Image (cartoon, rainbow, N blue to C red):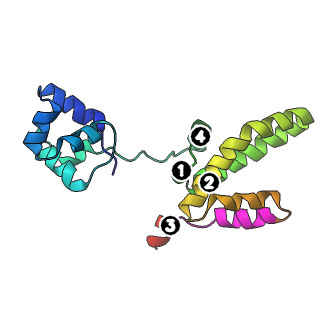
Amino acid sequence: MKIDFEKIKTLRLSKGWSQEQLSEKSGLSLRTIQRVENGNSISLESVKVLAMAFGIEPKELMIQEKQNPKTPIEVIKMCFIEFHNFSGKATRYEYWWFVLFMVLVMSVATLIHGTLNEIITVIFLVPFLAVGTRRLNDIGRSAWWQLFLIVPFGQIIVFYMMAEKGREQKENL
């Protein structure tokens, strides 16, 4: 569960409480309060106790899940921005829009000049691996499956897996 630790700290400071005073008012240990304000996660019960101490609803202390990008351009931007994120999940929509964009850009680069295609390929490599890893995480498979991309006809296996529904989509059926 993701907690807005900055909001907790802001609320505590706005009431003029120290961490020790918040600990006394909520009944949580001082160490738990310190961990929360440092960004560590806590249990739902601890969130409820903190919310009661501040006089607010528990959902106000929780970080809302980010909304999935809706347009292909937002998806492509997100894939480049999160090039370093190899954890988490990516939907089929995100993965396939990024792959389509990558193929189109590389095709145009090949038409312009072969060296340009090589440069574009290097630029796309890490974001492609990152979104592929997140996609494989979504379907419950290891990121190592991407090694099949370098094996002759291995791409068929990888692209088949990338087309599978995610865990949450399977459970909703």
Q: Position of residue 123 (x, y in %)?
A: 74, 36
Q: Is residue 131 left or right of residue 148?
A: left
> Are discs 1 and 2 less than 8 Å apart at CB?
yes
* Magenta region: 154-167
Q: Which mark is residue 133?
A: 2
Q: Is residue 6 visible?
A: yes
Dot 1 surroundings within 10 Å: few (below 14), some, or many (20 or more)?
some
Q: Which mark is residue 84?
A: 4
On the image, numbered disc 3 is attached to which residue?
A: 167
Secondary structure beneath label 4? loop
- Is 102 drawn above or below residue 132 in the view shown? above
- Is 136 drawn above or below residue 19 in the view shown? below
The tag earlier along the polypeptide, 1 or 3, is 1
Instruction: Give the CA distance from mark 2 to mark 4.
Output: 11 Å
Residue 161 sits inside the magenta stretch: yes
Q: Is residue 121 left or right of residue 169?
A: right
